[in-house]
Image (spheres, grey):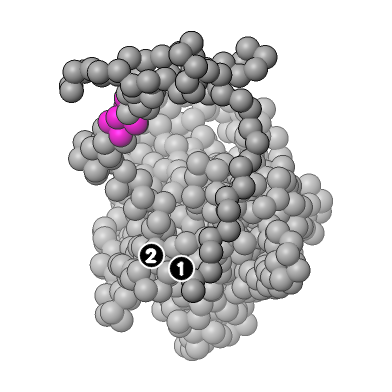
Amino acid sequence: MPPKEPPRRRVPGPARPRNAAGGSGRPRPTARPENRRPRRTAPAKRRGGSPRSIRLGSPRPRLRLISLCLTLVMVAFVVRLLQVQAVDASTYAAKAEKNRYLEYTIAAERGEITDRSGIALATSVDAHDITADPKLFTPEDSKAPDAPQQAAALLAPILGKEEAELAKKLSAPKSRYTVLARRQTPQVWKQIKDLKSAFAQKAAEDEAKGGPGVNVLAGVLQEPTTKRVYPNGDLAAGILGFVNAEGKGGGGLEAQLNKRLQGEDGKIRYAQAGGRPVPTAGSTEIPAVAGTDVELTIDRDIQWAAQRAIADQVEKSEADRGYVIVQNTRTGEVLAMANAPGYDPNDLAQANGAALGNAALQDVYEPGSTSKVMSMAAVLEEGVATPGTHVTVPNRLHRGDRLFRDDIDHPTWYLTLNGVLAKSSNIGTILATGQLGKTQPEANKVLYSYLRKFGLGSTTGLDYPGESPGIVAKPGDWSTSQQYTIPFGQGLSLNAMQAASVYQTVANGGVRIEPTLVRGTKDADGRYTAAEAPKRTRVVSEKTARTLSKMLESVVDDREGTGTKAHIQGYRVAGKTGTANRVDPVRGVYKGYTASFAGFAPADDPQITVYCAIQNPTKGSYFGGQICGPIYKKVMEFALKTLQTPPSGSDPARLPVAFKPGE
């Protein structure tokens, strides 16, 4: 038998109230229409008067409000998306491209400058531009609030820059590129690279321990470039010039030939992330084209001899400055152009500003007696006198508003025209040039025409930066005194190259050749192109030039000549001394002297022209024959041996210097 179900226990509960009929308290159902909603009744109250359940409000208003907010948010997103992807798509793409890609210039290798034998005078070596990405120094990227200051403190002693300057460059978060220092040596970049490696390793170890991993040098980068160096220090610095901090010629041939030398820069563009290239993103590169190499007419050894000789004498004489020029008589090529004092273009910070430039082309001064060769050329060419013409030279000569004298007091001299040049007589030169015209104004015009033919008042043809043409007034503007001082070299001005060119003209048979400094060029493909032939101009006849050459020998060879210290054993030497009153460039008055010597050798077969000048010697002698004659001799001897010029094969002409009264 199945087990009996246990009787249900009645759980006592509150007694239900009964209705009036005596039934239970459950309400009796009432009849209502089938579709009629039941009437809501108030909830029964519990004991104590509280309702049995809480009645909630309708959720629909809140749902509508939430839906409206979500709709507005979605509309904003859609509008912004349309703006980014449609309206401003190109702008944002460009910004993204800019932030992702870096572009920098590949500096072209600057062309080399060599002497005539191919020896480097100016060349370029590998260097580095130290750059940075300022964004990587922001607190967010560097994880250090003062990353620019920390990096600046580390880099300043290495780069030789001020901390404040570097910190300012690194504190520009809107920029992705800044240059901290240009053209630093590989050793400098190695120091920075070693520091970066040390900081990177330390940052990695810190991250492994859960730290932030700060590396304040992560944004320091480099770009390969080149640096200009001058292997011979100050040798030929006045000719070469220098390259400025931007890599462009700042003076001399470096500036004059900058377009040829600098070449064409290239460009490289690559993707980066966190300051590092992304290899898989690809890159584009336009290679640089190297600059043109330039071969000069300068001979390094002759340049060295000239520079040493003039520097020693300038120091010994405690002079302001001096210059020596050596020129190939037959070609016009400049073999040396030395200035003292000079400067080292490798270290411009230590250079004296007054020494920068090329004084041999930029200084203008009154030449003095070396200019008399032009006066004598005019007298001979016009046929008004010969080397043997008698000239009676008094101790004083009154002309115009002045009383003229020679450099020494003397009794009346009875000189030939050759003797006037040999003894460098101012009075004799005035008397001789006075014969160039029937009147003094006519004589002035004739002399002026020859000064211009010899190149005075015009630049030399070198097209050198800052070259001065000198000053030669037109004869109608000559003052009363100028018409008598100009014949012996006062009252007009020139530069040292012009003075050398005058003697090159005489040595070359009366044909002036424009001086040249550039012999040829070699482009990036190795093709050599010779320089154009210089302009040639006939100034005086060959006969006049030969006669002048013999007269100039008397200056050096004759015992009464003023240039005996320039004599060279085994060679016939033609030359002329000069000692001129010097115009003080600051005060504009005559103060001190310009000592000079000019000439060529061998006089019987001229090959080399040398000119020397010293400005304002203040110690010892100030006469050109005494202080410039020895320089001429040293430089000329060295040049003759270097170029293997054979000695003279004949004796000097020894033209008569004086005559006896009554002959």
Q: Residues within 10 Å of mark 1 (few under 14, many from 20)?
A: some
Viewer-proximal residue among 569 and 433 = 569
Q: Pick whichever, 261 or 458, lies toward us.
A: 261
Sequence-earlier tag: 2 or 1: 2
* Kind of residue at badge 1: Pro
Q: Determine which residue is flagged by label 2.
A: 270
Q: Is the stretch drawn in magenta largely helix, strand or loop?
A: helix
Which stretch appears magenta? Answer: 68-75
x and y percentages locating residue 321 in the rendered image? 67, 51
Q: Residue drawn 63% across and 32% down?
A: 13
* Left or right side of 605 for 129: right
Which residue is at a point 46% across and 45% down the rendered structure image? 466
Q: Quadrant of residue 72?
A: top left
Identified by mark 2, the residue type is Tyr
Near-viewer residue (500 or 604): 500
Q: Which of these two is toward me, 10 or 249?
A: 10
Assign a secondary structure to mark 2: strand
For residue 558, which numbered disc appears in the image?
none
Report which residue position mark 1 lands on. 277
Q: Is residue 507 above or below residue 485?
A: below
Residue shown at the point (70%, 59%) measured from the top left: 212
> Would you say 214 lies left or right of 547 here?
right
Question: Residue 663: in sight, yes or no?
Answer: no
Please report contact status of discs 2 and 1: CB closer than 8 Å, yes or no.
Answer: yes
Whether residue 490 is visible: yes
* Crowding near the residue tagged with mark 2, few <14, some 14–19, many ≥20 C-alpha atoms within 10 Å: some
- Tell me the distance, in whole angstroms, between the alpha carbons under discs 2 and 1: 7 Å
